[in-house]
Image (cartoon, grey):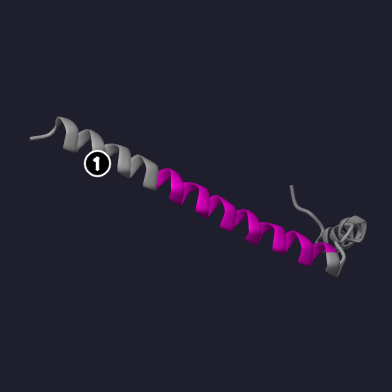
Amino acid sequence: MATNPVKFINETRAEIAKVVWPTRREVVLTTVMVFIMAAVMATFFSLVDLGIRQGLQFVLTYFGS
């Protein structure tokens, strides 16, 4: 099914006009929140990794040769 390119462009412009774009403040706040959450999650997983490593070292030392 062939689509008329002019019709396609007009429909695309109509759909883009319906988009509610975020304000600059909203973009900055959500970007800051993403960086904060990334830092929190990196810290959390680093601590979990450290705990697993210490536990595994304890088990291997206690039951190892």
What is the x, y in percent for residue 37? 63, 54
Q: How many marks?
A: 1
Is the magenta region chiefly helix, strand or loop? helix
Q: Left or right: 41 with respect to 45?
A: right
State the SS at label 1: helix
Q: Residue at x 91, y 58 (%)?
A: 14
* The magenta segment: 26-49
Q: Residue at x 39, y 46 (%)?
A: 49
Q: Is residue 33 above or below residue 62?
A: below
Q: Left or right: 38 with respect to 22?
A: left
Q: Residue at x 31, y 44 (%)?
A: 53
Q: Is residue 31 above or below residue 50?
A: below
Q: Inspect the image, locate mark 1, and give the three-letter code of the amino acid beneath it.
A: Gln
What is the x, y in percent for residue 46? 44, 51
Give the quarter of the image for residue 12: bottom right
Q: Is residue 24 above or below residue 34?
A: below
The residue that disc 1 covers is 57
Q: Residue at x 64, y 61 (%)?
A: 35
